[in-house]
Image: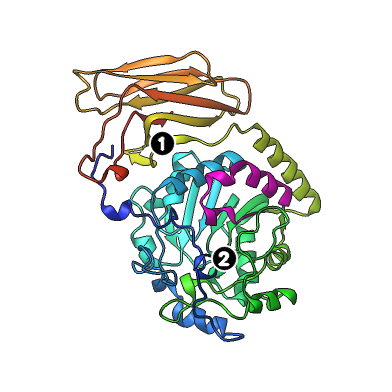
Amino acid sequence: MNHRRRTMSEFLTFDGVSKGELPMSADAPGRGPMTPDAPDYAALYRNDLQGDFYGADYYRPPASGIDSAIIYDDGEDKRVTAAFLALVFGPRRALEAGCALGLLVKALRGLGVEAEGFDFSRWCVDHAHPAAKSWVRWGDVLDLAPPERSYDLVLALDILEHVPPGSVPHMLANLAGALEPGGVLFTVVPAYGPNAFGPELYPLQYEEWRRDAAVGIPFRNIPLDDRGRPHLGHLTHATIPWWEAAFRKAGLRRIGDVENVLHECFDAAFEYPRRSFFVFVKAGSFGAGRAARRLAKRIAALPGLPHGFYEWERWGDVWARWTRSEARDVIAVRGRSSLALRAVCHHPDIAASPVTVRFAVDGGGETAVEFRDAGWHEVALSLPRREFAVLDIRVSRTWCPEPDVPASFRRELGVGIAYA
């Protein structure tokens, strides 16, 4: 169980943004440096953006709006994104391309998904989270061999824009090759201009970009950082139609109606950069329509996303996480009539002052469990006959294992939960 005092670097935030990468052009108050027309994208990639670019100097608080650095932490973004992916798509096997330190892989594993990832940065692989390290490997999206077992969900979050435009078709073909027929590719990419199925997050704010968008090519003037390199490692800046056409050539069809529903239901839960998501399916027009109908039905049944939990942890062979004083989980029923879980409280004074935890499914009758020691308690709860159920958890009091850190960074732990 993790009661350690976390370092300040784990608490750092920057304008509420974690790993989500905001291009300089989207968030900077003024125009930063740009390349001249038609840069040699391949040379920039080869000379400036190889794996060591994405090392310790990249994963740190940015010093300015044009500094190539991002915050990447085990915070609410990872918990929300993992829950969203697991509940919306219901994957069995998931592959994350460009997984960095494996924090999303870890969270998906905690949710029962057979998730794994690869990254171009050897620094990331070497420094992968200990609980995810077994499922994180080095890999290059431009040199990706077909897997022995395909995946029903492939993730490409904030990575597609990091390769030269001329390499995008090969990259997308590799990602499509990892998918099983009918599988979903979920991507987050800063694609520019109007979005027919969601908000316009990245406007065409420069004349040069509007010029290139009008003729359907990637932008020939791209933002640079304070050292003259492509800002954040982004090489491909292009419109949504350009990206959609590239996906279609790789055999991946956009299911925009699903995106539209997801934006309506979940944008409020996402950080700004994460809302620039797109959903593609490996199918023809008929198969894409069938996948869209299936997903729309599943989304309509979802009662929301979980909240009130801290990050997933590996306790020996068990995946578990702490709650706050109140938490709500969303359970995929999968035909079960009951839910078995294990619960534990580690309040230092628990023997003298017991802790009561109350569990309720779908607002029904409560099951109260009293904790008088730090041992595990088995809890069984009845599940309804429908696709999803809501589990509410209320803890009579919490405790803080990190009282010496600033108040806004302290964790107030309730009960530790592990599902059988």
Q: Three-letter amino acid code at disc 2?
A: Leu
Disc 1 and disc 2 in contact, CB within 8 angstroms: no
Q: Quadrant of residue 397?
A: top left
| Image point (62%, 21%), residue name | 385
Q: Which residue is mark 2?
A: 160
Left or right: where does residue 222 sit relative to residue 65? right
Is residue 35 depicted above or below 7 in this figure?
A: below
- Camera-side residue of 52 and 207: 207
Left or right: where does residue 272 sit relative to residue 127? right
Q: Is residue 205 visible?
A: yes
Most extreme residue toward the right is 286
- Characterize the magenta stretch by its predominant secondary structure: helix
Extent of the magenta region:
255-279
Is residue 417 depicted above or below 287 in this figure?
A: above
Q: Residues within 10 Å of mark 1 (few under 14, many from 20)?
A: many
Q: Quadrant of the C terminus?
A: top left
Q: Three-letter amino acid code at disc 1?
A: Phe
Element type at mark 2: helix
Q: Quadrant of residue 359?
A: top left
Left or right: where does residue 326 sit relative to residue 5? right
Q: What colouring style does the render use?
A: rainbow
| Image point (28%, 42%), residue name | 407
Specify the label residue 309 is tagged with. 1
Is residue 341 depicted above or below 257 in this figure?
A: above
Between circles 1 and 2, the one closer to the viewer is: 1
Q: Quadrant of residue 58?
A: bottom left
